[in-house]
Amino acid sequence: MPDHDMRSGASPLSGKAVVITGAGRGIGASCAELACALGADVVIADIDRDVLESVASKIRERGGSVHASVADVTDINDAQRIVAACVERFGHIDGLVNNAALHAQEWFWDMDPAWSRRMVDVNVLGPIYCAHAAALAMRERGGAIVNMTSGSQSGLPAWSAYGATKGAVASLTYSLAMELGDAGIRVNAVSPMAATRMSDPAPGFAPAAPIGHTTFPPASNNAAVVAFLLSDHSAPLTGQVVRIDADGISLMTHPAILNESFRAGSDWSFSDVQHLFETGLATLSQPLGIVRQ
Ligand SMILES: NC(=O)c1ccc[n+]([C@@H]2O[C@H](COP(=O)([O-])OP(=O)(O)OC[C@H]3O[C@@H](n4cnc5c(N)ncnc54)[C@H](O)[C@@H]3O)[C@@H](O)[C@H]2O)c1
């Protein structure tokens, strides 16, 4: 358990029941371990039974309250089942961490269409299905949903299809935060960074190094942010994407309209548009990739 939790002696997630998908390894497993250590009752879900059981055993050995459920988040019935399991076992659901995902590091020239489709299913439909099931169950007493996006949502060569799924997750976060706020449901996202199998380079690719650092941060750094977003201590926050880098925590900008509209009259022609770009609009072109403003 991180020292700040030991120091405060508080259990910020005490009384909360949380579902975490993709909790069999990596960031999801770390989120589950920390959420239990901070007092939550946790349903862990993963498509991989073996790793899921080992995470559950580890948490139980430490006295944590955990229920493991093998589930495929692309199956709407599984999404509903893991939320129902949380309500049945623990009486309610207060949090959902949409963490399960697949990845692909591949040049776009070599893109595998079948794998891209599976990534869209797992990374986009999975969070939509789980968030829908959780939101319905949270409707009376509110709750917190945390989605996992990625720096690749801003653009990253060799990660286009994966990055597209994570851009979708960011958009989902913004819309759900706006729509579910009236029901007391907060929706935020984390743009994580951790040494996991996902950060291992694919064959033929050089190891990636976080900017200014030689190593990736531990999964537990990410888990601490997720736990904060699940807790009531983050009550004012919704619709935000929290970025984690090797050197710390920041917020991502929201994609918004950059400037006052350039006026071209009520009807405009090709040459009007060309004129606007050549006389100013083009100079506002935005940098690509995960950059700091
Ligand atoms: N590791 C990083 O640096 C990094 C960077 C950016 C974003 N992320 C995101 O963080 C999250 C966790 O990543 P990680 O590095 O721990 O990945 P990981 O591959 O180590 O773990 C992902 C887990 O999801 C599970 N999973 C896959 N498909 C599933 C399905 N259909 N149903 C249920 N579970 C399924 C896997 O079995 C696995 O246990 C992901 O959303 C990922 O996109 C990670």
Image (spheres, rainbow, N blue to C red):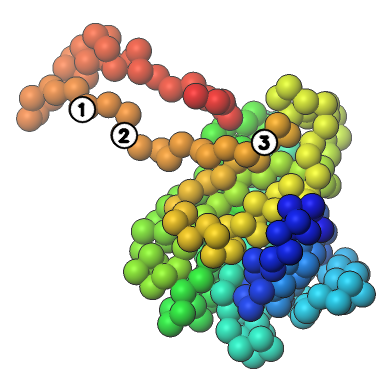
Estimate how packed mark 2 is, as few (under 14), some (14 to 19) or many (20 or more) residues with alpha carbons within 10 Å.
Answer: few
- In-front residue for pair 175/227: 227
Q: Amino acid at mark 2?
A: Ile
Q: Are marks 3 and 1 in contact (CB under 8 Å)?
A: no
Regarding mark 1 in the picture, which secondary structure is present there? loop
Regarding mark 2 in the picture, which secondary structure is present there? loop
Q: Nearer the viewer, mark 3 or mark 1?
A: 3
Q: Which residue is mark 1?
A: 261
**Residue at position x 62%, y 57% from top?**
228
Q: Amino acid at mark 1?
A: Ser
Answer with left or right where residue 178 lies relative to residue 12. Answer: left
Estimate how packed mark 1 is, as few (under 14), some (14 to 19) or many (20 or more) residues with alpha carbons within 10 Å.
Answer: few
**Residue at position x 67%, y 45% from top?**
192
Q: Nearer the viewer, mark 3 or mark 2?
A: 3
Q: Which residue is mark 3?
A: 248
The quarter of the picture showing ligand 1 = bottom right
| Residue 108 rendering spot, x and y as whole percentages | 65, 33
The residues bearing labels 3 and 2 have C-alpha atoms spaced at a distance of 28 Å
Relative height, residue 22 to residue 80 (above, below) = above
| Residue 82 rendering spot, x and y as whole percentages | 66, 79
The residues bearing labels 2 and 1 have C-alpha atoms spaced at a distance of 9 Å
Answer with left or right where residue 221 lies relative to residue 233. Answer: right
- In-front residue for pair 23/141: 141
| Residue 2 rendering spot, x and y as whole percentages | 79, 53
The residues bearing labels 3 and 1 have C-alpha atoms spaced at a distance of 36 Å
| Residue 114 rendering spot, x and y as whole percentages | 67, 52
The mark found on residue 124 in the picture is: none
Residue 18 placement: quadrant: bottom right
Q: Which residue is mark 2?
A: 257
Which of pointers 3 and 2 lies earlier in the amino acid sequence? 3
